[in-house]
Amino acid sequence: MREPHPYIPNSSRRVKEEMLHDLGVDDVEALFDDIPDSIRKNSALNLPPARSEMETKVRVEDMLSRNFSTRDVVSFLGGGVWPHYVPAAVDEIVSRSEFLTSYTPYQPEISQGILQSLFEYQSMTAELMGMEFANSSLYDWATAIGEAARMSSRVTGREEFLVPNYIHPDRIQTLRTFCEPAGIRVIEVKQDRRTGALLNGDLQNKIGSKTAGVYIENPSYLGFFESNARGIGEIAHEKGALFIIGADPISLGLFASPGEFGADIAVGEGQPLGNHMNYGGPLLGLFACRGDRLLRQMPGRLIGMTMTKDGTSKAFAMVLQTREQHIRREKATSNICTNEALCAVAAAAYLSLMGPQGLEKLGKTILANSRYAMEQLRKVDGLKVPLFEAQHFKEFVVDFDGTGLVASKVNAGLLQQGIQGGICLHEQFPELGESALYCVTECHTHQDVDRLVAGIKKILEER
Amino acid sequence: MMAFKQAQWNEPLIIDRSREGVVGFSLSSPENLPADVPVGLLRKKRPKLPEVSETDVIRHYLRLSQENYGVDLGIYPLGSCTMKYNPKLLDRIAASSKIQDLHPLQDVGSAQGILTILHELSEWLAEIVGLDKVSLQPAAGAQGEFAGAMIMRAFHKQNGNLEQRDEIIIPDSAHGTNPASATMAGFKVVEIPSNKEGCVDIDALRVSLSHRTAGLMLTNPNTLGIFEADILEIARLVHEAGGLLYYDGANLNAMLGKAKPGRMGFDIVHINIHKTFATPHGGGGPGSGPIAVSKKLEEFLPVPTVERDGDRYYLDYSRPNSIGKVRSFWGNSSVLLRAYAYILMMGREGLEEVAEVSVLNANYLARKLSQVRGLELPFPHKVRKHEFVLSAAKMAQETGVTAAHLSKRLLDFGVHAPTIYFPLIVDEAMMIEPTETVSKQELDEFIVAFSKASTEAYTNPDVVKDSPKSTSVTRIDEARASHPKTMQLTWKEKVRAGRET
């Protein structure tokens, strides 16, 4: 007989015996008699023995202490997950255990709190994106593009999906995984090597009667804006295709929304909105669209505001569930069930704190900080910053070609000085030479940037 | 029984608390916009976001939290959802800056702590399910299913017969995600019926198996909580037909240390971390859905996997036949970290105790509830595992009180209702999974709640039909809630009479 366990009240011997007696069996093993012996005898667990809570805490914290966080080193990494300040109030709200320990709100009357929070999240996401509707979350930006491609194909009955070629490697790979079994071909459209703008000629060559959707990002993976977003949307619409825009929500207090550029579907990564980086997950897939035709094909959960049956008060519930797997099974618009609800609550709390003014001000701060970094880096001999001649936000490409150094060597040198450099791009985009994607947010001070510049200079001097 | 009254704040939408000029942020150094930013890129219309103070935001969401029921408040017996207690230690650990402030692309040398944890967790999960290799990437159970179905696809493609093998067989008692995931991965779904014992009908399986079979998706114990005792025969038949066996890990809790899916003959398994390994469900997510596979399928796993080279841990992309990626980066790391701490603390004996007591609790509850008037336990002579399904069909027939009514009445007694109308093969189904973390007193209180509701159904059915009354809001008409004329999806949207359904 084992020791009683703090999480398992009925592990106490007396209680267990009482319950077994009620069931008319002597031993709990009798409840597993229906499992064939050949399975049972080979199923013992070869795992470490149990530990106390204190021992567990000490051991896990010791292991975690070997990590260097962005508080230990100055980091210029972005590219899909970015360092942004998370207000204390947001952490407080998502740690409320009534939210934290609740399930999907299948019983709406006793789950109004999470339902109203998610309804507010949907409202704010739709506002930010300039769209009519938003769902209550997908897993991340990459899967949101995958769902958008499949939705475009369902809506148009077509099987080609156009994307820009300077795209996050995880996004394109995830998109291909989502598209291949649906028979959707993912086609990359070239971007101008100098400005990053989508090449009109290449777009015209590749778009046609088979095109289900045209996807662009503003700002893009490499930090620059597509200046002709509206025009691209018009071309897509002329050909009967949907227009999909991916956006960084933290830019949308200042920069134009996907809706303002004419998008039918908007996607993005919600991690910047009050969610920690957490080594890449959980993330928060933003998904919004407009028009009833698209709404009916939308993936994921939707929360609606309605009234109680007796008409006495407003009430919230999961709605339009006939799109979803638990009702429609193989005919569902997506298989998604568990989503990123708590991350969506964090985003709702974050956007409530920021409001329209805060988000605009934050956009300006990030713009100014990243501009300062570009200006300072540009002064270093041999660096081209930014590589693309366009408006940038938060991220930009530093080209090391003029220094004769490879980007990975620069990063190694920076790391020795306690600085984590940007993402090396050579492997994915050889044509961009020895370059790296740098990210500067409100979390970076001028001193951080100055340290980076001094660090690079030092490496160049020692070359 | 406890008197229950949920908070009723009648809290307005946060946007309705908005007052121009009120702020909830503190940002240093306001910056003017540089003159050279193209006007065409700037936002023209301000988003309609609330202008509220931090105090407003905290009060608003804390009031809403009080209008929400969680595991920390009481029993949450949704079947197949494994709503067990989430140890507080796990949240404390996950709040560390040493996980929250890690960037996924930082130099692996500066992330050795978390990589060690992820690697060790991968090995433990492989051991727990009895398979060879794990990918931690999928964000949730359904994504694990999709990844698993994509692996079936890659396997048959490599063998040159994907075009022929385009069917996945799924029992009629399966979770809805199974057929949805199989379809997403490009397969046709062949549904097979359950037999009189509530298990896979072997004859129906035989008939369905063919050269077109890519695989079978199964949960064991099944959604009735019954162990598929013919599993070895099922596995043999599917393998002989050239198919693969997929294990839906939603019901893994009862199998810990008792029966490894790998020993049952399964080739691919997904694990719902947020169920079996006690991480909080967050009102619908985040979860985490790692997959484990047998040796012959390792080459198809998503990239990258966490590998070890002596004392050094790294991310390995060298898997040319991989299905690619199913999401960005490596997985829901902070959820996985919690699971690591949970397994470390429970140890092998703790996990086995989890399985035993979850099964003890389910059988105890099944026995007692089947004695409540109007409720029946289908397949009564079968021992249950972690969960069971009651039928309220008799009550519905005799009193007009349905499983839906009954579940609403339970809310009035301060307990969460079971999953209802699932699985589809039981009439007026109520699917109940107590988990190992409830006490006998709580089980007994739950039984009293059910008995009271039953008595009411036979004496004063309108009380049950008009419930709930003790929750933050009274009964919601779900049909009306999905009707576009009486529902809105954002605070801006007007309820439009003309919208199509």
Image (spheres, coloured by chain):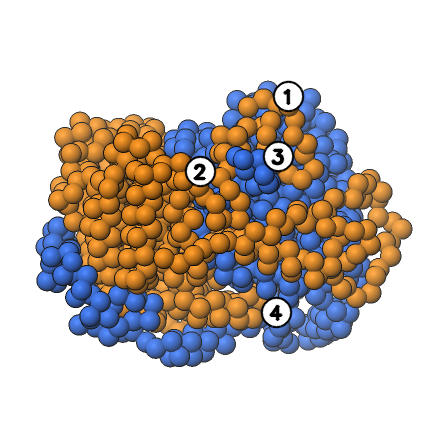
Chain colours: A blue, B orange
Q: Badges 4 and 1: C-beta atoms under 8 Å apart?
A: no
Q: Secondary structure at mark 1?
A: loop
x, y percent for residue A20: 16, 61
Q: Chain of mark 3?
A: B
- Considering only order in the chain, which callout, 3 or 2, is on the residue closer to the N terminus? 2
What amino acid is at disc 2? Asp
Q: Nearer the viewer, mark 2 or mark 4?
A: 2
Q: Chain of mark 2?
A: B
Give left or right: position of A442 versus A165.
right
Give left or right: position of A158 versus A418.
left
Classed neighbour count for the residue bearing mark 4: other residues with Cα under 10 Å, few (<14), some (14–19), many (≥20) = many
Q: Secondary structure at mark 3?
A: loop
CA distance for labels 2 and 4: 55 Å
Depth check: give the residue in front, A65 or A93. A93
Using the image, tell me which numbered label, if any, was put on residue B466: 2
Q: Badges 2 and 1: C-beta atoms under 8 Å apart?
A: no
Q: Which residue is mark 3?
A: B488
x, y percent for residue B177: 38, 39
Q: Chain of mark 1?
A: B
Q: Secondary structure at mark 2?
A: loop
Indicate the quadrant containing the C terminus of chain B: top left, top right, bottom left or bottom right.
Answer: top right
Q: Nearer the viewer, mark 4 or mark 3?
A: 3
Q: Nearer the viewer, mark 2 or mark 3?
A: 2
What amino acid is at disc 1? Gly
Depth check: give the residue in front, B293 or A95. A95
x, y percent for residue B358: 26, 58
CA distance for labels 4 and 3: 42 Å
Using the image, tell me which numbered label, if any, was put on residue B332: none
